[in-house]
Amino acid sequence: MFSHAIDVASQFTEPYVGLRLRDNGEVFSTMGAFIVVNSDGWILTSGHILSEILARQNGSSHTPASPDEQRIVAHSEIWAVPGFMQSTPRLITAHVNPVADIGVCKIEPFDAATISAYPVFRDTAVSPIEQGMSVCRLGFPFCDVPASYRQESGEFALDEHAFPVPRFALDGIVARFNRRLTEDGTSSALFVETSTPGLRGQSGGPLLDTQGRVCGVQSHTTHVDLGFDAQYATDSGLVTERQFLNVGAATHVDEVCSLLDAFGVAYRKG
């Protein structure tokens, strides 16, 4: 059902990798996804991904300043558009809507010839997103990007086999729509909730219809209490666990288009 959609979206869905060095010398990576919106190098991703990057770049991260083995002492961001190994793109402009958990930014350098197709954002005035319709999300979960840190140069070094990172698709249906309010109730944003969870590494990736049109951008997963416990036997006796349903939440495409419109970012609707 989604083979065509995934083929389409794979042309503009790319991995974001955050490389981190802890005070104890440990190097680790975080994964996400982003959507290349147009040939000018504008990209979309989750607001929480972009906010963390901006906080680290301006030195306002909440990482403790006191000596701590878990403290992050160096970081690097990789926007892995095709050809990035020759010249790693960097952010030059960024805007975040924290309520909708969506961010748009421009990267440079960017070679438009490396992207074979750009996304079409579903026009909900013509084709509304409906409860029960089939959707699919695309991103980069279950991946680890091996890297090391060179103290002499102060730079991260990627393993030669780190890329390409495989995309992972997960389908489901639109379960409901959920409007998130700020604590003071003055602002809100609409999310599409799905019958399947979003996975770590899919944040910032597209929620697609069967034609490959973008219906939203993956934001988070909510763990909904089912209201009952389950028991199972172990060698040490019965274990009781609360049961939850993991519900994926994507920023609704109307919120995405509003952000793009607000900052004059060109995109296609259909």
Image (spheres, grey):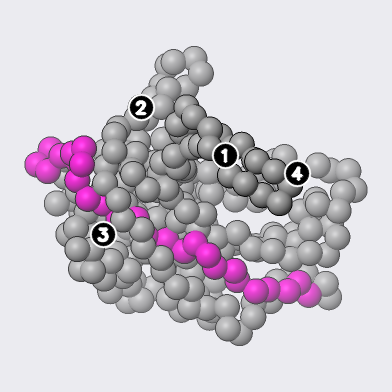
User: What is the x, y in percent for residue 129?
Assistant: 19, 41
Give the mark nearer the N terminus: 3 vs 1. Answer: 3
Q: From the viewer's perspective, is the residue at label 4 or at label 1 nearer? A: 1
Q: Which residue is mark 3?
A: 119
User: What is the x, y in percent for residue 215?
Assistant: 26, 47
Q: Callout 2: helix, strand or loop?
A: strand
Could you tell me if residue 119 is visible in this image? yes
Residue positioned 32% across, 69% down in the render: 10
> Is 138 situated left or right of 3 in this image?
right
Q: Are marks 3 and 2 in contact (CB under 8 Å)?
A: no
Bounds of the magenta segment: 125-150
Q: Are marks 2 and 4 in contact (CB under 8 Å)?
A: no
Q: Which residue is mark 2?
A: 179
- Of 19 and 236, nearer the camera is 236
In this view, 224 is above or below 53: above
Give the mark nearer the N terminus: 4 vs 3. Answer: 4
In this view, 202 is above or below 158: above
